[in-house]
Amino acid sequence: MTPEAAERLSTQLSTVAQYETLRMAMLGELLPPEARSGLMLFLRRGMWGWARTLAAASAQHERIPSSSLSRKGPSEHRAVIHLFAAMAMKTNSRRTL
């Protein structure tokens, strides 16, 4: 696995973990203080807006030329799709247990 792929996987797993934190808070668990801004973003912009914001933030952490950050291209959309797929797969595996 390339370092870029490993970093992308790590980012996706982190995003799924953040989503799970928000989901558990909705089910009555205590919401950690560091997750409150994510909850506000989720409530204000919805799941799609929340996921796009996280994908854009992770794209900014990658070393991309500044000219490509100004336009939202297929890489951002692909990151959001991968995020949703990872969350769906995690949900499906939990239901089969």
Image: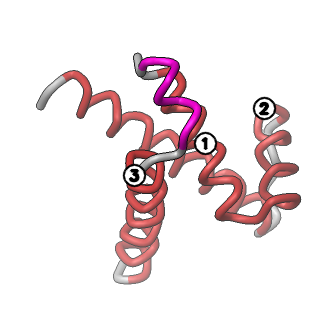
In the rendered image, which residue does mark 1 sit on? Answer: 54
Q: Position of residue 33 (x, y in %)?
A: 85, 34
Earlier-in-chain disc, 2 versus 3? 2
Say which quarter of the image contains residue 28: bottom right
Q: In the image, is 33 to the left or to the right of 87?
A: right
- Magenta segment: does it hold 55? no
Residue bearing mark 3: 74
Mark 2 element type: helix
> Quadrant location of the N terminus?
top left
The residue that label 2 is drawn on is 34
Image quadrant occupied by the C terminus: bottom left
Q: Is residue 9 above or below residue 46?
A: above
Q: Amino acid at mark 2?
A: Glu
The Cα atoms of the two marked residues, 2 and 3, are separated by 30 Å
Element at label 1: helix
The residue under the point 57% across, 38% down is 56
Select label 2 or label 3 by which is in front. Answer: 3
Is residue 68 located in the magenta-colored stretch of the structure? yes
Q: Residue at x 69, y 63 (%)?
A: 23
Residue located 54% across and 25% down the image: 60
> Please, which residue is most extreme toward the bottom here?
96
The earlier-in-sequence mark between 1 and 3 is: 1
Q: What amino acid is found at the position of numbered circle 1 in the picture?
A: Leu
Q: Residues within 10 Å of mark 3 (few under 14, many from 20)?
A: few
The stretch in magenta equals 65-71
Residue 51 picture location, percent across and down:
61, 53
